[in-house]
Amino acid sequence: MERHYLLGNEAIAHACLEAPVDFVSGYPGTPSSEVIDVLRSRPGRGYYVEWSVNEKVALENALAAAWCGLRALCTMKHVGLNVASDPLMTSAYTGVTGGLVIMSADDPFAHSSQNEQDSRCYAHFARVPCLDPSDVQEAHDMVRDAFALSEEFGLPVIFRPTTRICHSKGDVELGAVVQSTRTGVFKKDPRQYVVIPAHTRVLHKKLNEKQPAVKKRLTELGYNTCAIKGKKAVISGGIAASYVQELLPGGVSFMKIGAYPVDEAWLSGFVRKHDMVLVIEELAPEIEEQVLQVAGTVDVFGKKNGYVPYEGELSPQAVAIIMEKAGILPANPYPAACPVENLPLRPPILCAGCLHRAAFYAIKRVFKDAVYPSDIGCYTLGLQLGVVDTTICMGASVTVASGIAHAGETRDIICTVGDSTFLHTGIQGLLNAVYNGANITVVILDNRITAMTGHQPNPNTGVTACGIVSPPVSLDAICRACGVSFVETVDPYDITGMMNVLRDAQSRAGVKVIIAKQQCVISARRAGVKRGRYRVDDELCTGCGICVQFGCPAIEMENEKARINELCSGCRVCAQLCPPGAIMREGKR
Amino acid sequence: MSRLCAALPAGCNYAGGEAMSTSFDILIVGIGGQGTILASNILGVACLHEGRHVKGAETHGMAQRGGSVESHIRIGGEFGPLIPPGQADLLISFDLLEALRYSHYLKRDGTMVVNRHLVLPTSVYVQKLAAPTEEGIVSILSQFRLCLLDADRIAQEAGSPLSQNVVMLGAASRVMPLNPASLADAVRQLVPPKTVAINIRAFEMGRDAGGACSPQS
């Protein structure tokens, strides 16, 4: 046994090597992405690994591998499970032969997400087991065990770490890496794999019949534990359990839930030995609702009576406040502390030289009074530039644009979508918009990669997850195949050129697509692309501030004059905006 | 521009007293891209060398794009990875403004090691906000046990401006419950092989600078 200091997602990836896993698929999404990034870059791997185009596609691939007897892992963020929910719900009926672990990483506080949904609810809904780790070591151990658990009951297992597990670190004890000897073989069994009504009714009954044994086994596995110390108790799960343990005073009982569904008899036996029970969990009241069902006359404190918030993430200080409010004095009271007020914020921003900023600038110049539906990616930061009016879920830029158009809005409608998001779930919306005759302009912000989640390749990049060359798909051909006749590809660094194409699109009816194509500035730098930096000529600069308003972090104001700092990547966009022509390449006069 | 708040925010004023911490809690803050994650990895690996438990949490994903970032490291940590406000024994900041932003995390008798370097957020220029000044921030930070150093200059002298994160660790090592040799070993293990000599020099020079401004001395 070796100890390593690892990120939660690195420990999870290593547990897959110990299982060992045979088949890996997923779609990038914070905070889940590093698991596949670790697995795909491991030399000499004996397993198959792919970045799929979306989560539904990923899960169906992994499910098929599990039907062939392989151990399969499918990773996504919580909202990805919405996309994959169609195969999820029925995969519980068909079951699996090889272990199938679905990692759905939740993001309480929406650090990097559009909502705070709780994957435990999906597990409950689908009636499949769910494992919810409280620290990095447990995350590792759960994943190592999850494949065998899946095989034992023939059910997919949802593994639900949160941001504070995926992106926290700890000293972790790792096991040995094992080489798999399995080969996938599909054994035909229509009653299992063809869910016609006659089959699925039987499968549904079988799924329900599995539940009591699953509950019993999960308690035996040791992920649900309790210690009775007095007449008051705290019940917690996931990362919140580690905060509770830090603060739990002597004489108070503690129950930790790490695996669902929970055995009611076991839970009831614990709850009924107490006068009061405080349930502390993040997001949905999954544990609390079960506790309420078995509590009888025992007082239950939790979300339902206002002691614990439904929203956001918990923290040691939040848990200390909750415990004290419920009459349990924390063992480790923290001194009150409050932040310095009125400091200028430092939110994430588009990089210096990012193609999105240039494209947004051109869009705003041409489509002055327009509606700007957008989508999910780095370019959502275009909100700061006033060119993002809507964002709801992956691929919903094109559909929201066509919906607004058909609703009777008379202003121009121009939406933005990234290449990876377009390939994820944008194509269907484009096809629909053309078919139903919407009057919209679609700008595909094509940076050749899935940038925001850490530069994972997609079908547009030219390589697979494992770096094998795979010819980049033609976005132009896809759009034309959907029936779009106006498809133009432009370089967003050429502001004038892009504005001309935008004007052309504005003057036409129907669905118009503009592909604003330029490599992501981070991947360009990694690939060794070097453009000369730009500088401001102090004598020519009038201090008008137009370049600063562009919002590039490489441009600052110093003593009433613009200055370009070392972040400059040489995109030359600001030089095109400067009225007196004071911005020029370094070394030129 | 800013002031230390006198009143406690609502919900903050529960029965307090000095916290009894079992871990030595270090918060590293800066701007995405300054190398906070490498710095936290060096601390984690140094803990492994000494056979100590360690927990940490950090900012990944979208928040990294030039935004404010934080890494929590709890040496000897047995529980959660998050350091509660008012609980950090040591705050290491790669930027003056970020030091101020996270200053409420520091314990009353904690130490702050800060790079004398100020990057103004782009929002200050775009929205024409009042810009905090270096002198203004330093005067507020002076209320703490403060070690202020010019890590950029020291890193340049050590051989690369990129080694400023290791300079900061070297300076902060003066107040850490870790053997400097374990930290230096972790530096050797984690920095790119070609830069080991530069980074070891950066660590030693940072340690010297930390000694010169150490609140204990």
Image: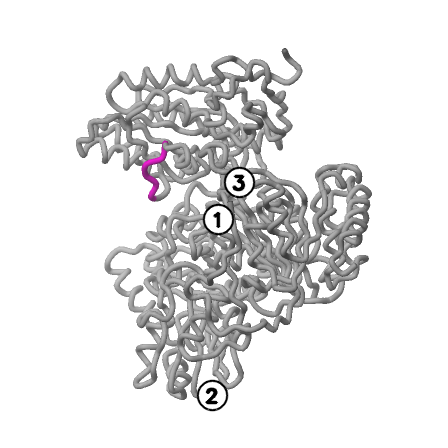
* Residue hosting label 2: A230
Give the color scheme: rainbow, by chain, secondary structure or one colour: one colour
Which residues fall within the magenta stretch? A387-392
- Residue type at mark 3? Arg
> Mark 2 and mark 1: span between their CA atoms?
41 Å
Q: Nearer the viewer, mark 3 or mark 1?
A: 3
Residue at image x 71%, y 62%? B47
**Residue A70 appears in the picture as rendered:** no
- A211 displayed left or right of A564: left
Q: Which mark is residue A30?
A: 1
Q: Which mark is residue B65?
A: 3
- Residue type at mark 1? Thr
- A53 displayed left or right of B76: left
Q: Does the residue at mark 3 contact the one at mark 2 (Cβ under 8 Å)?
A: no
Residue at image x 31%, y 72%? A305
Neighbor class of circle 1 (other Cα within 10 Å; few <14, some 14-19, many 20+) is: many
Which chain does the residue under circle 3 lie in?
B
Quadrant where the N terminus of chain A is found in the figure: bottom right
Neighbor class of circle 2 (other Cα within 10 Å; few <14, some 14-19, many 20+) is: some
